[in-house]
Amino acid sequence: MDHFIYRDGILHAEGVALPDIAATVGTPFYCYSAATLRRHYQLFTDALSPLPHLVCFAVKSCSNLAILRLLGDLGAGMDVVSGGEYLRARAAGVAGEKIVFSGVGKTRAEMRLALTDGVRQFNVESEPELRALSEVATAMGTTAPITLRVNPDVDAGTHDKIATGRKEDKFGIPIARAPGIYAEAARLPGLSVVGIDVHIGSQLTDLAPFEAAYRKVADLTRQLRADGHTISRLDLGGGLGIPYTRSNEVPPLPSDYGALIKRTVGDLGCEIEIEPGRLISGNAGILVSSVIWVKEGEGRKFLILDSAMNDLIRPAMYGAWHDIVPVGEPAPEAIPDVFDVVGPVCESGDTFARGRPLPPLAEGDLVAFRSAGAYGAVMASEYNSRPLVPEVLVHGDHFAVIRARPTFDEMLARDTIPEWL
Ligand SMILES: *Cc1c(COP(=O)(O)O)cnc(C)c1O
């Protein structure tokens, strides 16, 4: 459920009519609903209660400081995958003790940054990383809390580009080798083993792969404890999928996911961490765009929008589906037209949808891409020198611009022409 609904024939975000935002900030823009973000966070924390737990929002899904502040204020921790994300979480006011540092290629500089300013744990993904972290922490005279990210060799059954838990994926250490590497971690100075980490992929619409992975983690917990390690925390990753269409897909609910966690690892006496991104931010955001032209092609009609693949890359990158809805509610008797929905970028890949039935639309009409809050604005670029798409956060009857659209002057001012030219 989200808070993007028609009222008096106009699509609203909570209490704000989208054309009012468009009149202020121009199009395209991302728009998030604070109430939806809060609700999604709450669903997870309710699902895990009464187990001791921390919901660590995956910053990479939607990293605006205002969003991080909103979730941090509710008590969320953060899962970061770079020094930049770590700094974002800190700048949003999240304590280092609530920040989990994930990622397959952490640099020594990133390790130092997090060790200086505080970190809950590093989720270590390889032996070279383990040794480097030991060196860095020892040189700083400190101890780094760690888990090892294990790769359970489970196929998440999701899009190839976002499956991470199969043995051929670059992530984590093979679970069969975990006992040996935990032994090494225990021997190395400057490290303190606190638990186990696993993350098998994104947009999972079935609980079975989670169940398979978490059962393996439970077995590993018992084995590592028998070997003398302290396993007090289990980081179970993110990945729960969301509905991208109103109709067919029905992904599992956070409550089902919570019940699964209790069933598989709930008796181990561990603190549970999860790292949801998409399920918190995905359906809490939309991308609003205007129709530039309706163009008649050879046997097809193109709806040319002022948003493009540089603003929302998911359709081009993953073949992803986004529901596209007119901001003006169509009359019930309106006869749908069929459009190829495209942006102005000079790539055929700049196609949001082919043969999409939509109500009749004309130049200047506003449309909204639903489910665009996760992996939307964060993946935007300025390709074709289109200034970075702005972001707006709605709270009840108010909205705030939480990232302004750069002016053309600002965009050009970032380049430097050397004096010898
Ligand atoms: C991407 C990622 C997540 C979040 O995945 P979602 O599908 O957005 O929930 C969590 N943990 C790690 C390590 C990730 O790489």
Image: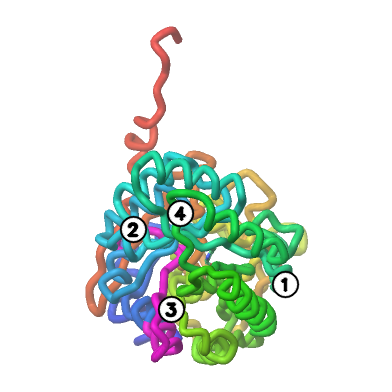
Of tags 2 and 3, the one toward the viewer is: 3
Spot occupied by residue 175 in the image (x, y as percentages of width and height):
68, 66
Give the residue drawn at x 48%, y 70%. 230
Q: CA distance from mark 1 to mark 4?
A: 28 Å
Going from N to C along the chain, the mark reached first, 2 or 1, is 2
Residue 290 as seen in the image, left or right of residue 68 = right
> Image point 46% across, 66% down: which residue?
194
Give the extent of the magenta segment: 42-66
Q: Position of residue 187 (x, y in %)?
A: 53, 53
Question: In this rendering, is residue 401 above or below 32?
Answer: above
Indicate yes or no whether the magenta region holds residue 46.
yes
Residue at the spot of label 4: 191
Residue 271: mark in rendering: 3
* Secondary structure beneath label 1: loop
Tell me how far mark 2 sits from mark 1, CA to CA: 31 Å
Alpha carbon separation for disc pair 3 and 1: 23 Å
